[in-house]
C-alpha cells in the first residue's frame, strides 16, 4: 500500500490518501481523518440537526416543480428555484425544456398547490443554467442568494428537490437531503455528500437558508453543483433573456453563426440552419491530403495523461485519459469528467517516446474543461489554440486521442488514434459551448484529446462526436491556471451513523436476509419467535429461502399477503427467534434523524425528506409494445422495468391463467382481469421464447414512455400505490427493502418499502411504511398465517 500526496488544501480534516487495489473505480482514494471520524465536520453536522425543520419551512416555498408536458419525447420534469419576487425561476440543466421545437413554456407547480405558467428567459449551456419567468403577477416566494466564494468543505447543507416519479405525478412539497459540502471550487462548482435524484436539479441550501447552487450534471461517480455565483454574476443578462454563451464568448465576426442573426444575436434561440448557410449540404467525403499538416501537429501535441494517484475502474491500473499540449512551456488542455482534482500528480506520455511529470490544475466538470501543467523542463511540442467559431458544416477537422484500453488490455501504445472527420451540418443552429463532427469509432480514454482545424490549430476538447469549444478553454484559462488546489473534505465517515450503533445492534438480531432463487432480494423482520417473518411481497417471484442471523439458510413459505401495502408473512423452519416490536406512534416529522438497519448491523442513516402522504399508483402496462403474430401477441421491444422477466420477441400466451391469443385480448385481460393490480405487482405469465414454452412469475411493468427509463438498479418495481408512506434520504440497495427504520432509541418507526434510483449517484428517496400501519397489517397477516 503506497502513501500518496495530493496537494488538496485540507479543511476540518487531515486527508491521508491511500492507493490500493480495493479503491472504487475512478474515485479519489479513501481518506483517513483525524480521530477517524471527521471531528469538526461531524460536530457541525450534528449541531444543525435541530434547525432542519425550521430551515425546511423557510425554504420550501421557493422550491418548485417545473414540468413540460408538450414535449415530443414525453413529459419532462425538473426542480426549479424561485430567485426573484417577480417570478424568475432558476433551473439546473433546464435548457432543453424551453428551447425545442415545441413551445417555450412550462408549468410551475408551487408547494401551496398553485400551478402557473412560465416562459423562457436566459440560459447558459457553459454553466448548464436556465431561467424561466412566471407569467402571472407576483410577488413570488424567492429564496435568498448566497455565495460560495468563502464556502469551506465540511460545511453542512440541505439539498432540496422535487422527486421525479415514473408517472410524472408530483409531490406538493420538496424532498430534503442533509449532508455537507465535500469539494468546492469557489464561485464555480461544488459537490456534496447528498445524492440527487436523476434530473431533479436539486437546490443546495446553506444553513442560513441561502442558495449555494443547483445540481446540473454528473460524471463518473459524482454529481456536480453549479455555484450560485455564476447566476448572480450574470443575473441581468439571464433576466433579459440572453444566451450567455454568446455574451461570454461570442463567435468571431467571420463565423457563419452571425449570418442572418440580426442586431441582437444574443437573444436568439434555435433557428433554421439553412438561413446561415449558402450551401447547406457538406461534401460527402474528406480529402485527407488537406489534413496532413494537421495530423502531424495532432500526433506531436496529443498526450496520454496517466494518474499517479487514482486507480481506474478495475482497481489495478492507474486512471488514464488524453490531453493536448497547447503551449511550449507545457500547459495541457483536457476534459474534466475523468474526476481528477487540482494537485493530482500525472505522468505525461508523448508519441515520440518521452515521458514527463505534470500536475493537474483547475478543473471545471460543469463545462467539462480542465488544465494540467508539465513540471519537467521543456520546451514541448504544442498546438496553437484556434477559433472553433470559424468552422462551417462540412469543414475538415482532425480528431485525436489515446484509447485507454485496446484488445481488452490497458493500452501502453505511444501511437495516438488520429482520424479525419468533418463538422456536422445541423438542421437547427444555436451558438453554444460545443460543436459536432461526423461519427468516428472512438474508445474510452480518448476523452480530453483534441479537435484540430485544417491548419492544425486546437479548436476543441475531444468528446466523441461532440467537442467542447476552444473558446471556453480560453475564457476559463486564467481561473483554471491559477487553481493549484481546492478545498476538500473527502473520506469523512457518515456523520449520523454513530448515533445508531448501539440501537442497531439490538434490532439486527431480529432480521433475516430474503433470498429468491438463491439471490438476495429483500430483508425480513422476525415478527414471531416461532418462525413468522414480515417482508416486501412483490419481490417473492421464485423459490424463497431465508438466511438467519447465525448464517443458517432455511426454506420460507408465503402464508399471507397484503397487496395494498406490499407486505407478506413468511413461515420459516426455525424457532426461538428474537421477534421485533413496532412502535405505532404518529409518523416522524421532516428532518428527524432515522436509520435503516440491515443484517450484520449494517446501518444506513438519514433524515425524513417528505412527511407521510399517499403516493398514487403510476400507470401500468396496458399491452403496448406488443404486436400480433401467428403464434400470439409478441413483444416488439423491451419493456423498461427492474425485475421484469419478459424479453423482446416473447410471445405471451396467458397471464394469470387468462388466455391471450391476440393483442386486443391481451389488452383486455390487462384491463379487466387484472383490475386492482399495480405496477410492480407479481403476475404469472406463460410464454414462448425461441419456440420454447416457459412460465415466469414477473412484475407488471410501468406504462412505456414518460420517464420510466430513468429507473435503474436501485429502483424497486413496486414503488407506488401506497396509502401512506413517508420518504427519507436513506440510501439502501434494492435488495435491502423490507428492512426496519429506527430512531436513535432503537424503536422501529417503519419499514423501508420502496427504493428509487438509477445508480449510485442518482438516487431517489426511500419510502417507508409507518409503524402504525405496519403493526396493524402485521397482526392481521400473522392471524391469517396461523389460520392457514
Image (spheres, grey):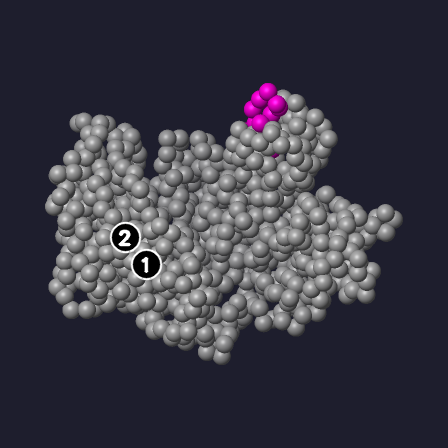
Tell me what residue is drawn at x 19 percent, y 29 percent: 283
- Give coordinates of residue 248: x percent, y percent: 24, 49
- Give coordinates of residue 146: x percent, y percent: 39, 60
- Give coordinates of residue 575: x percent, y percent: 81, 62
Picture quadrant of residue 260: top left
Depth order, front residue of 674/249: 674
Residue beneath label 2, please?
402
State the CA–CA distance, disc 1 to disc 2.
9 Å
- Give coordinates of residue 652: x percent, y percent: 63, 29
Secondary structure at numbered mark 2: loop
Q: Is residue 777 visible?
A: no
Secondary structure at numbered mark 1: strand
Question: Does the stretch in magenta take in 152?
Answer: no
Badge 1: how crowded within 10 Å, few (<14), some, or many (20+)? many
Disc on the earlier residue, 1 or 2: 1
Depth order, front residue of 349/346: 349
Picture quarter with the N terminus: bottom left
Q: Give the number of marks.
A: 2
Looking at the image, residue 780 sits to the left or right of residue 768; the answer is right
Q: Residue furthest top?
A: 630
Picture quadrant of residue 259: top left
**Magenta region:** 621-634
Q: Is residue 178 above or below residue 722?
A: below
Tell me what residue is drawn at x 56 percent, y 36 percent: 647
The numbered disc on residue 9 is none
Badge 2: how crowded within 10 Å, few (<14), some, or many (20+)? many
Tell me what residue is drawn at x 60 percent, y 47 percent: 716
Tell me what residue is drawn at x 60 percent, y 40 percent: 644
Q: Is residue 174 above or below residue 253?
A: below
Q: Is residue 571 above or below residue 495?
A: above
Residue beneath label 1, please?
320
State if disc 2 and disc 1 touch (CB < 8 Å). yes
Amino acid at each position: 500500500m503506497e502513501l500518496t500526496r495530493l496537494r488538496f488544501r485540507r479543511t476540518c480534516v487531515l486527508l491521508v490518501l491511500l492507493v490500493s487495489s480495493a479503491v472504487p473505480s475512478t474515485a479519489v482514494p479513501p481518506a483517513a481523518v483525524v480521530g477517524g471520524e471527521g471531528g469538526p465536520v461531524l460536530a457541525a453536522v450534528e449541531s444543525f440537526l435541530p434547525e432542519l425543520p425550521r430551515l425546511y419551512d423557510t425554504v420550501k416555498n421557493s422550491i418548485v416543480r417545473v414540468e413540460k408536458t408538450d414535449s415530443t419525447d414525453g413529459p419532462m420534469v425538473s426542480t426549479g428555484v424561485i430567485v426573484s419576487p417577480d417570478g424568475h425561476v432558476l433551473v439546473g440543466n433546464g435548457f432543453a425544456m424551453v428551447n425545442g421545437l415545441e413551445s417555450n413554456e412550462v408549468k410551475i407547480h408551487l408547494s401551496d398547490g398553485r400551478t402557473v405558467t412560465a416562459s423562457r428567459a436566459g440560459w447558459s449551456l457553459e454553466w448548464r443554467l436556465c431561467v424561466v419567468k412566471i407569467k402571472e403577477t407576483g410577488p413570488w416566494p424567492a429564496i435568498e442568494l448566497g455565495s460560495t466564494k468563502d464556502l469551506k468543505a465540511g460545511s453542512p447543507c440541505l439539498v432540496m428537490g422535487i422527486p421525479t416519479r415514473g408517472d410524472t405525478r408530483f409531490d406538493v412539497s420538496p424532498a430534503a437531503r442533509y449532508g455537507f459540502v465535500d469539494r468546492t471550487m469557489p464561485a464555480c462548482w461544488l459537490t456534496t455528500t447528498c445524492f440527487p435524484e436523476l434530473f431533479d436539479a436539486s437546490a443546495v441550501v446553506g444553513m442560513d437558508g441561502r442558495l449555494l447552487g443547483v445540481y446540473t450534471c454528473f460524471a463518473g461517480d459524482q454529481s456536480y453543483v453549479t455555484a450560485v455565483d455564476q447566476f448572480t454574476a450574470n443575473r441581468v443578462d439571464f433576466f433579459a433573456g440572453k444566451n450567455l454563451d454568446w455574451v461570454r464568448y461570442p463567435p468571431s465576426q467571420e463565423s457563419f453563426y452571425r449570418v442572418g442573426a440580426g442586431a441582437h444575436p444574443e437573444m436568439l434561440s434555435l433557428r433554421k440552419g439553412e438561413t446561415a448557410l449558402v450551401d447547406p449540404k457538406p461534401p460527402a467525403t474528406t480529402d485527407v491530403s488537406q489534413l496532413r499538416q494537421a495530423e502531424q501537429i495532432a500526433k506531436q501535441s496529443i498526450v496520454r495523461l496517466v494518474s499517479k494517484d487514482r486507480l481506474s475502474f478495475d482497481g489495478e491500473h492507474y486512471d488514464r485519459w488524453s490531453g493536448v499540449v497547447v503551449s511550449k512551456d507545457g500547459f495541457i488542455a483536457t476534459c474534466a469528467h475523468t474526476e481528477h482534482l487540482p494537485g493530482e500528480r500525472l505522468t505525461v506520455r508523448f508519441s515520440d517516446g518521452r515521458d514527463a511529470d505534470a500536475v493537474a490544475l483547475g478543473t471545471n466538470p460543469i463545462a467539462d474543461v480542465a488544465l494540467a501543467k508539465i513540471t519537467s523542463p521543456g520546451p514541448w511540442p504544442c498546438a496553437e489554440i484556434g477559433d472553433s467559431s470559424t468552422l462551417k458544416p462540412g469543414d475538415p477537422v482532425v480528431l485525436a486521442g489515446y484509447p485507454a484500453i485496446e484488445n481488452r488490455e490497458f493500452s501502453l501504445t505511444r501511437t495516438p488514434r488520429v482520424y479525419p472527420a468533418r463538422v456536422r451540418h445541423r438542421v437547427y443552429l444555436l451558438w453554444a459551448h460545443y460543436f459536432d463532427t461526423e461519427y468516428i469509432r472512438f474508445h474510452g480514454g480518448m476523452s480530453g484529446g483534441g479537435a484540430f482545424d485544417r491548419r492544425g490549430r486546437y479548436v476543441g476538447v475531444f468528446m466523441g462526436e461532440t467537442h467542447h469549444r476552444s473558446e471556453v478553454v480560453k475564457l476559463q484559462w486564467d481561473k483554471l491556471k491559477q487553481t493549484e488546489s481546492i478545498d476538500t473534505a473527502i473520506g469523512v465517515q457518515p456523520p449520523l451513523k454513530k448515533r445508531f450503533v448501539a440501537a442497531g445492534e439490538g434490532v439486527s438480531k431480529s432480521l433475516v436476509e430474503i433470498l429468491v432463487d438463491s439471490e438476495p432480494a429483500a430483508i425480513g423482520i422476525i415478527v414471531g419467535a416461532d418462525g413468522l417473518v414480515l417482508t416486501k411481497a412483490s419481490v417473492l417471484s421464485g423459490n424463497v429461502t431465508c438466511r438467519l442471523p447465525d448464517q443458517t439458510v432455511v426454506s420460507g413459505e408465503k402464508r399471507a399477503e397484503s397487496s395494498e401495502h406490499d407486505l407478506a408473512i413468511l413461515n420459516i423452519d426455525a424457532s426461538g427467534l428474537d421477534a421485533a416490536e413496532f412502535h405505532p406512534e404518529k409518523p416522524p416529522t421532516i428532518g428527524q434523524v432515522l436509520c435503516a438497519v440491515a443484517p450484520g448491523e449494517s446501518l444506513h442513516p438519514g433524515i425524513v425528506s417528505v412527511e407521510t402522504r399517499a403516493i398514487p399508483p403510476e400507470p401500468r402496462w396496458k399491452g403496448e409494445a406488443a404486436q400480433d403474430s401467428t403464434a400470439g401477441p409478441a413483444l416488439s421491444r423491451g419493456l423498461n422495468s427492474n425485475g421484469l422477466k419478459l424479453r423482446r420477441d416473447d410471445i405471451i400466451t396467458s397471464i394469470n391463467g387468462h388466455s391471450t391469443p391476440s393483442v386486443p385480448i391481451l389488452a383486455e385481460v390487462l384491463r379487466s382481469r387484472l383490475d386492482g393490480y399495480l405496477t410492480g405487482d407479481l403476475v404469472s405469465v406463460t410464454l414462448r421464447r425461441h419456440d420454447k414454452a416457459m412460465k415466469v412469475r414477473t412484475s407488471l411493468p410501468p406504462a412505456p414512455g414518460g420517464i420510466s427509463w430513468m429507473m435503474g438498479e436501485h429502483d424497486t418495481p413496486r414503488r407506488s400505490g401506497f396509502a401512506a408512506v413517508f420518504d427519507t434520504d436513506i440510501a439502501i440497495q434494492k435488495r435491502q427493502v423490507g428492512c426496519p427504520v429506527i430512531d436513535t432509541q432503537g424503536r422501529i418507526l417503519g419499514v423501508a418499502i420502496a427504493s428509487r434510483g438509477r445508480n449510485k449517484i442518482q438516487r431517489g428517496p426511500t419510502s417507508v411504511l409507518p409503524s402504525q400501519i405496519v403493526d396493524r397489517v402485521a397482526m392481521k397477516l400473522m392471524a391469517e398465517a396461523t389460520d392457514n
